[in-house]
C-alpha cells in the first residue's frame, strides 16, 4: 500500500492484475479490508470507499478531489475516510467490474460503459440518470497534439488522413477515449460536409495512418511522448494541464469541429453496505459541488457548471463543439459508427 501525502490511499489494481491476475487483485482488496485488525495494523478503523476511474482521472482525484473531501469529512464528523482507487482504460475497469471487483463507485469515460454494466446486472438499470446532470461529472473536448512547431502542418482531423502522417491512437477495444476519438473523426467530417461517405473516407484515412495504439488514452500519450507518430488524438485535459506545468513538449491543434466527451458517475448499490450509504451519498454530492468542480477546472476538465469554466484561460475556443447526442446517442453511435463502420468496414479495409 502506498500512503499518499494527501492521505488518500491508492491501490494500483491494474499493476496487481498484470502481475498476478485478477485473483490477486481481489485478494489484495480482501487484505485491505481486514488490515485494521491485523497485528501492527491501523490504530483506528477509517471509513473506506472503493473508487474506480478512467485513466486520465488519477491525478485530479488523488491529488485534488479526494483530499478535499477527506478534510471536510474529518472536520465535520471527526472520522477518517480512505479511498482505494484504480485508474485504467474505461473499458478495462468496466470489464473488471463485470468480473466482480467490489467497487462502490466508478467514473467512466463514456455512458456506453455504464450501459454495459447495467446490461451485465452490475447496476440495477440506468441509475446514473438520477444523479445531477444525468450522471455527467465533467467534460473535455477532443483535440490533436502535434510535435513542437507543427512540422507536418496539421490543422484539423482531415490533415490526419494525408499520406505520410503518423497517428497515435488509443485502442477502442479497451479505451473510452478511443471511442470518443472515433466519433470526433467521423462526426467532424459529417457536420462539415453533411455527407456520410466523406465522413467515412476521413475516418478510413485517419486509421490508415495509425502507427501505434495503447490500451488507454494515458498509454497512447506515453507512446507519443516516446517518439511514435506525428500526432495524437486525445482529451484537451491531457494537453493543457501538463503543458501549463512544462511536463509536455507538444503543440495543441483545435479542430474546427470536434466532440465534447462527457464522463459518467455510477454507484454500485449492491456493493455498498447500509452503514456506508450516508458517506457515499455525501461523496457523490460533493463531486458536483463547486469545490470539487473548481478542482476539475484547475486540472483542465471543463465543469458541468458553465460559470466556473472562465477560471481556466487555457481552455480553447472551438467553432463547432458537438456531443454524442448530436449523433443519436451512445447506443446508435456505437452500433452505426463504431461497430458497423470502424470495426466492420475500416478495420477490414486496412487489413487489421
Image (tube, helix red, strand yellow):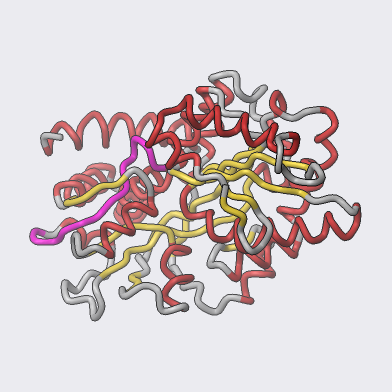
Where the C terminus falls, by quadrant? Answer: top left
Image location (x, y in percent) of residue 126:
64, 29
Q: Residue at x 17, y 50 (%)?
A: 205
| Start-end of magenta stretch | 163-175
Residue 84 in the image, given as x and y percentages of width and height: 62, 43
The residue closer to the viewer here, 195 or 335, is 335
Q: Is residue 166 magenta?
A: yes
Residue 6 position (above or below residue 211):
below
Q: In this figure, what is the number of numbered marks?
A: 0
- Seen as rendered, the residue at the extreme left is 164
Most frequent secondary structure within the magenta stretch? loop
Query: Which residue occupies 56% across, 48% down?
Result: 263
Q: Nearer the viewer, residue 247 or 159?
A: 247
Most distant residue in the front direction: 39
- 281 magenta-colored: no
Q: Nearer the viewer, residue 328 or 291?
A: 291
Q: In the picture shown, does residue 41 fall above or below 242? A: above
In the figure, 114 relative to 235: above or below? above
Q: Position of residue 313 (x, y in %)?
A: 55, 79
The image quarter containing residue 343 is top left
Question: Residue 16: x, y in percent?
Answer: 45, 38
Q: Residue at x 32, y 64 (%)?
A: 144
User: Hey, which residue is sitting farthest right in the picture?
Assistant: 77
| Left or right of residue 242: residue 152 | left
Residue at 19%, 60% in the rendered image? 228
Position of 330 compared to 294: left or right? left
Amino acid at each position: 500500500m502506498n500512503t499518499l501525502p494527501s492521505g488518500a490511499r491508492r491501490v494500483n489494481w491494474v499493476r496487481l492484475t498484470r502481475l498476478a491476475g485478477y485473483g490477486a487483485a481481489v485478494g489484495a482488496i480482501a487484505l485491505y479490508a481486514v488490515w485494521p485488525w491485523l497485528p501492527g495494523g491501523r490504530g483506528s478503523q477509517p471509513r473506506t470507499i472503493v473508487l474506480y476511474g478512467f485513466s486520465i482521472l488519477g491525478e485530479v482525484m488523488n491529488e485534488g478531489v479526494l483530499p478535499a473531501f477527506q478534510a471536510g469529512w474529518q472536520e465535520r464528523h471527526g472520522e477518517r475516510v480512505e479511498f482505494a482507487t484504480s485508474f485504467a482504460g474505461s473499458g478495462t475497469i468496466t470489464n473488471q467490474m463485470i468480473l466482480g471487483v467490489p467497487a462502490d463507485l466508478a467514473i467512466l469515460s463514456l455512458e456506453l460503459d455504464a450501459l454495459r454494466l447495467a446490461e451485465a446486472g452490475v447496476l440495477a438499470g440506468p441509475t446514473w440518470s438520477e444523479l445531477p446532470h444525468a450522471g455527467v461529472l465533467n467534460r473535455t473536448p477532443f483535440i490533436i497534439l502535434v510535435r513542437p512547431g507543427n512540422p507536418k502542418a496539421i490543422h484539423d482531423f482531415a490533415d490526419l488522413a494525408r499520406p505520410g502522417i503518423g497517428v497515435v491512437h488509443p485502442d477502442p477495444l479497451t479505451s473510452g477515449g478511443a471511442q470518443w476519438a472515433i466519433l470526433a473523426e467521423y462526426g467532424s467530417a459529417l457536420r462539415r460536409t453533411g455527407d456520410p461517405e466523406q465522413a467515412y473516407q476521413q475516418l478510413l484515412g485517419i486509421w490508415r495512418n495509425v502507427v501505434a495504439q495503447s490500451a488507454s488514452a494515458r498509454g497512447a500519450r506515453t507512446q507519443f511522448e516516446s517518439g511514435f507518430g506525428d500526432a495524437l488524438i486525445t482529451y484537451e485535459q491531457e494537453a493543457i494541464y501538463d503543458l501549463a506545468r512544462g511536463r509536455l513538449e507538444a503543440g495543441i491543434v483545435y479542430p474546427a469541429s470536434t466532440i465534447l466527451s462527457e464522463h459518467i458517475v455510477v454507484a454500485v448499490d449492491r456493493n455498498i453496505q447500509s452503514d456506508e450509504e450516508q458517506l457515499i451519498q455525501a461523496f457523490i454530492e460533493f463531486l458536483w459541488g463547486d469545490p470539487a468542480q473548481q478542482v476539475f477546472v484547475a486540472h483542465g476538465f471543463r465543469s458541468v457548471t458553465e460559470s466556473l469554466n472562465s477560471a481556466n484561460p487555457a481552455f480553447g475556443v472551438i467553432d463547432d463543439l458537438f456531443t454524442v447526442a448530436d449523433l443519436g446517442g451512445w447506443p446508435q453511435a456505437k452500433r452505426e459508427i463504431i461497430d458497423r463502420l470502424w470495426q466492420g468496414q475500416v478495420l477490414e479495409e486496412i487489413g487489421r
